[in-house]
Image: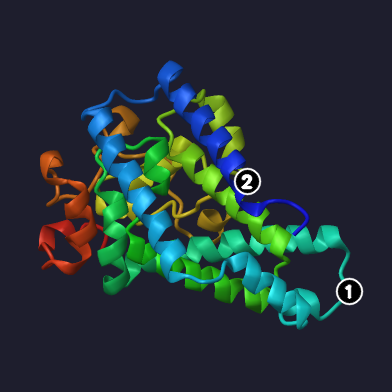
Amino acid sequence: MMFDENLLRSAVFTIAFLAVALCEVYWPRRNRHFSKRIRWQRNLGLIGIDTIIVRLLMPFTVVMIAESATQYHVGLLNLVAWPLWIKAVVALIWMDLVIYWQHRWFHQLNGLWRLHKVHHLDMDIDVTSGLRFHPGEILLSFLVKSAAVVVMGVPGVMVIVSESLINSAAMFNHGNLAIPSSVDRLLRRILVTPDMHRIHHSVLVRETNSNYGFCLSWWDYLFNSYTDQPDKGHDAMELGLSGYRTFEKHTLLYLLKLPFVTFQQSGMSTKK
């Protein structure tokens, strides 16, 4: 690489995080119900643990895998001398599609749901919620993305671009942001907006089992998983999971051990 990958990722992350966090202060969509300080400590603590575990357990990155695939001409995009702009567009769309189905599988398969429900326990959502995942889910996601990169032959630089865009989109669409309805309707023709994704965090099963998209909104329309508005409206809609409504117990240690404890049947709120 001709540039510092980590520096670029860090710069994009910082700019996106601060931009959404600042907008949440001035244009909040919903009133907070729980301590922002405590939530941020837990969420950022989990994000920090994720980063450390990935660095310790993974001796290589998705970018390194992508560059090896390119070097050995592995993957669909490496079979033909496509123009760079075509490779870029296909790679971005492909990676977002993979993340959509990965997300949907994490809801539909019991073993994966054990990990993913850590993300859904948050009973207020904001910019930090978009990056709050159990380390086990992060590791599995690494494997899924690596396989997707090899199959398609995604160039290394496009891995960086796609991951930066998807992470930024996740912070944006989890943001507690008040966007005018006319602008929201226009944006969600292409992008997942905060109002669109917030429905996915509803305590109601059929609303949680919808709006799986992370960046592009097309997939929810195409694969019949789109919900336009929550039944109770955005202000009255309850967020989180039934069976896990005690905020005080959602400590960092609790979030880490949750996938390995006995199921609470009422907590399986996204299973049909």
Q: Position of residue 248 (x, y in %)?
A: 12, 39
- In terms of image quadrants, where is residue 249? top left
The tag earlier along the polypeptide, 2 or 1, is 2
Image quadrant where one finds the N terminus: bottom right
Q: Residues within 10 Å of mark 1 (few under 14, many from 20)?
A: few
Query: Does residue 48 appear left or right of residue 150 in this picture?
Result: left
| Vertical side of 237 occupied by 149: above or below | below
Q: Position of residue 237 (x, y in %)?
A: 27, 35
Query: Does residue 40 appear left or right of residue 171 in this picture?
Result: left
Tell me the SS state at disc 1. Answer: loop
Residue positioned 43% across, 34% down in the render: 175
Q: Which residue is mark 1?
A: 81
Amino acid identity at mark 1:
Ala
Query: Can see residue 183?
Result: yes
Q: Position of residue 116 (x, y in %)?
A: 32, 60
Tell me the SS state at disc 2. Answer: helix
Residue positioned 12% across, 52% down in the render: 243
Q: Position of residue 12 (x, y in %)?
A: 60, 41
Q: What whole-number distance in Å separates the C-alpha atoms at marks 2 and 1?
A: 30 Å
Residue positioned 68% across, 51% down in the render: 4
Query: Can see residue 124?
Result: no
Q: Residues within 10 Å of mark 2 (few under 14, many from 20)?
A: few
Amino acid identity at mark 2:
Leu
User: Which numbered tag is attached to residue 7?
Assistant: 2
- Foreground pick, 159 / 214: 159
Residue positioned 70% across, 77% down in the render: 68
Query: Does residue 208 appear left or right of residue 84 in this picture?
Result: left
Furthest toward the top, the residue is 26
- Foreground pick, 109 / 228: 109
| Vertical side of 271 occupied by 192: above or below | above
- Foreground pick, 160 / 162: 160
Query: Does residue 16 appear left or right of residue 126 in this picture?
Result: right
